[in-house]
């Protein structure tokens, strides 16, 4: 069978199972002593289970020897009475070894659970640290869902597989080897009979299960298609309703769902044959043992107890075979998950900071000098950007979509490293500063708001929990948020979650208040008023004018009416500054900026 995850869904096979498991073993090297102890305990527990059936057969022989037999029309009475003392001794011995085996099994389970949970904790901790060291480029090139899946699903799968497969594999292998030794020790003819019948049944089972591989793969693909379609339609539900796309969406869903139903039915049907076939294998072994054992017993070559022992050993023999198969599948799942996790942990990190300077008292003079950059080194999008911003200036960056406005802000914040040229703050190249130092210099309000589950106060004071109540109120009023907060049932203590109705504009106001609380010496506003109404926009503009007074600020705006009072307007197109100046100067030139401005107010 193909490997299955915790939700009984097939898991992609690892490209290099040995390499992935090797990395996992190296990662867990500190815990290997505990794993070895658990394995040894599991072996001891298996040995106790293997010994038992032979003594069960001895009890049967003692009982059979003391029971009268009817042979050729006459009763034959035993010459000796029932040997109760020997039977009790063997019974007590069996109770002891089975009890010890149960205790050992519990101990090894406790140890392995501890190992897996510590491994899971360590993996999540390392992934969390890794996320903070990865460049923004990685997150731009990978979906958040895939990254989240590595942190949650893949790590959980590794833990689950380790807990189930390692000890199970060792126990099953020990059980298999021990049962074979015990069977051949008791009677080699019966041993060959039991093995032959069991192997024959397993060959039949493997032939059937191998046919299900393609259906499990199809099920996985179709399940992903259904999930993707449902998520897409659900997230865009309003658009689908407005454009009348319900019927088309339903037809698409029915088609994908039909394929999933077909592949899932076939895969689950073949998978469902596992237990019946396992029962068939066990019953086939029982029948073979009883027939051959009966013939040998009639000829006086074995005792009845041998048959009983072999019936137990047949069950012990078939069980490890299926456990080994399941453990190998589980290890394959762990290898696939490990491959994804360690692939993430091996991603190239941000170049380490080698600070040569530190800015504490920031005046706010910024210079872009011949900056060149491309997200793809072979495709430059910022060609030769140069600009000089003096302390306290309000700089607006405008231009059509794709001109490179947000890219320049990303470079200024060192989210990306420039390919050529330099960016300096107060004469210091930002590459000589730590990224944390650069980030502390700027307050930032983005077009995409980020609100987490928590109170209004927690959202505004994010990472600034020591802010005084007076400063909080001042920031709230300056952002035009005071009236909204006072209308809430619990004011600043109102919890913002999925059940709280809050508009996009109100979310933007909260992020603006958050930037005001941060009180950084420089500001970046990326379409900060894009989600608010005209009246609120006027209030925010007044607040922003007060906030940016005396501070160097960079404003990215598509609404050109919001940046008319900017000290310097940089007009970008195709990665270059094609015009610069204040609003009046640029309008008098009648160039690209004037065309942009007039196009927005052509209807007025």
Image (cartoon, rainbow, N blue to C red):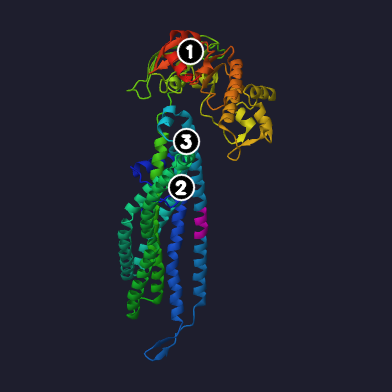
- Residue 286 in sight in this render: yes
Q: Which of marks 2 and 1 is nearer the N terminus?
A: 2
Residue designated by label 1: 569
Q: Picture coordinates of residue 132 (x, y %)?
A: 48, 30
Residue mark closest to the camera, 2 vs 3: 3
Q: Picture coordinates of residue 436 (x, y %)?
A: 52, 22
Main secondary structure found in the magenta portion: helix
Q: Is residue 105 magenta?
A: yes
Where are the magenta residues, as a range? 101-107
State if disc 3 and disc 2 touch (CB < 8 Å): no
Disc 2 and disc 1: Cα gap in Å?
65 Å
Mark seen at residue 450 = none
Disc 3 and disc 1: Cα gap in Å?
42 Å
Q: Is residue 348 magenta?
A: no
Up-down relation of residue 88 to residue 587 (above or below): below
Q: Is mark 2 on a helix, strand or loop?
A: helix
Q: Picture coordinates of residue 15 (x, y %)?
A: 33, 42
Residue mark closest to the camera, 2 vs 1: 1
Q: Which residue is drawn at 46% across and 8% down?
A: 588
Residue designated by label 2: 35
Badge 3: few (under 14), some or many (20 or more) residues near its Cα, within 10 Å?
many
- Residue 426 in sight in this render: no
Q: Earlier in the sequence, mark 2 or mark 3?
A: 2
Q: In which quarter of the image is the N terminus?
A: bottom left
Residue designated by label 3: 127
Q: Residue at x 44, y 29 (%)?
A: 134
Q: Which of marks 3 and 1 is nearer the N terminus?
A: 3
Q: Of 95 and 484, which appears nearest the observer?
A: 484
Q: What element carries label 1?
A: strand
Q: Of 576 and 122, which appears nearest the observer?
A: 576
């Amino acid at each position: 069978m193909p490997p299955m995850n915790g939700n009984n869904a097939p898991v992609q096979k690892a490209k290099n199972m040995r390499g992935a498991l090797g990395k996992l073993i190296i990662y867990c090297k500190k815990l290997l002593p505990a794993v070895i102890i658990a394995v040894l305990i599991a072996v001891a527990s298996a040995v106790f289970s293997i010994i038992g059936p032979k003594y069960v057969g001895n009890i049967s022989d003692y009982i059979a020897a003391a029971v009268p037999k009817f042979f050729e029309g006459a009763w034959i009475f035993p010459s000796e009475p029932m040997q109760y003392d020997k039977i009790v001794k063997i019974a007590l011995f069996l109770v002891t070894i089975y009890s010890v085996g149960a205790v050992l099994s519990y101990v090894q389970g406790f140890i392995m659970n501890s190992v897996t949970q510590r491994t899971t904790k360590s993996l999540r901790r390392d992934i969390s640290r890794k996320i903070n060291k990865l460049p923004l480029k990685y997150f731009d090139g990978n979906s958040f869902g895939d990254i989240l899946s590595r942190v949650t699903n893949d790590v959980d799968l590794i833990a689950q597989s380790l807990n189930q497969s390692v000890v199970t594999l060792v126990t099953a292998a020990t059980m298999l080897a021990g049962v074979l030794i015990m069977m051949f020790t008791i009677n080699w003819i019966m041993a060959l009979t039991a093995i032959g019948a069991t192997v024959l049944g397993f060959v039949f089972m493997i032939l059937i299960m191998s046919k299900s591989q393609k259906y499990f793969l199809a099920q996985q693909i179709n399940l992903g298609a259904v999930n993707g379609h449902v998520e897409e339609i659900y997230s865009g539900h309003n658009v689908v309703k407005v454009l009348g796309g319900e019927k088309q969406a339903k037809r698409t869903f029915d088609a994908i769902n039909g394929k999933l139903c077909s592949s899932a039915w076939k895969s689950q049907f073949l998978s469902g044959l596992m237990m019946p076939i396992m029962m068939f294998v066990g019953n086939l072994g029982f029948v073979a043992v009883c027939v051959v054992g009966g013939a040998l017993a009639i000829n006086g070559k074995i005792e009845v107890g041998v048959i009983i022992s072999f019936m137990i050993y047949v069950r012990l023999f078939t069980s490890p075979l299926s456990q080994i198969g399941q453990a190998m599948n589980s290890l394959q799942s762990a290898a696939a998950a490990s491959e994804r996790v360690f692939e993430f942990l091996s991603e190239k990190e941000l170049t380490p900071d080698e600070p040569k300077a530190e800015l504490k008292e920031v005046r706010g003079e910024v210079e872009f000098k011949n900056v060149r950059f491309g997200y793809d080194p072979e495709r430059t999008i910022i060609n030769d950007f140069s600009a000089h911003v003096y302390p306290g200036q309000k700089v607006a960056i405008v231009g059509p979509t794709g001109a490179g406005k947000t890219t320049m802000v990303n470079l200024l914040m060192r989210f990306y490293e420039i390919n050529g040229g330099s960016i300096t703050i107060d004469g210091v190249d930002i590459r000589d500063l730590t990224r944390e130092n650069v980030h502390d210099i700027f307050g930032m309000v983005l077009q995409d708001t980020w609100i987490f589950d928590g109170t209004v106060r927690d959202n505004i004071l994010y990472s600034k929990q020591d802010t005084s109540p007076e400063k909080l109120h001042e920031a709230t009023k300056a952002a035009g948020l005071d009236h909204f907060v006072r209308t809430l049932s619990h004011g600043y203590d109102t919890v913002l979650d999925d059940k709280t109705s809050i508009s996009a504009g109100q979310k933007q106001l909260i992020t603006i208040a958050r930037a005001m609380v941060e009180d950084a010496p420089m500001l970046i506003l990326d379409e900060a008023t894009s989600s608010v109404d005209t009246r609120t926009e006027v209030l925010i503009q007044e607040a922003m004018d007060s906030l940016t007074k005396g501070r160097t600020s960079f404003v990215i705006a598509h609404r050109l009416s919001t940046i008319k009072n900017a000290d310097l307007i940089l007009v970008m197109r195709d990665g270059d500054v094609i015009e610069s100046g204040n609003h009046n100067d640029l309008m008098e030139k009648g160039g690209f900026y004037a065309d942009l401005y007039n196009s927005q107010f052509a209807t007025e």
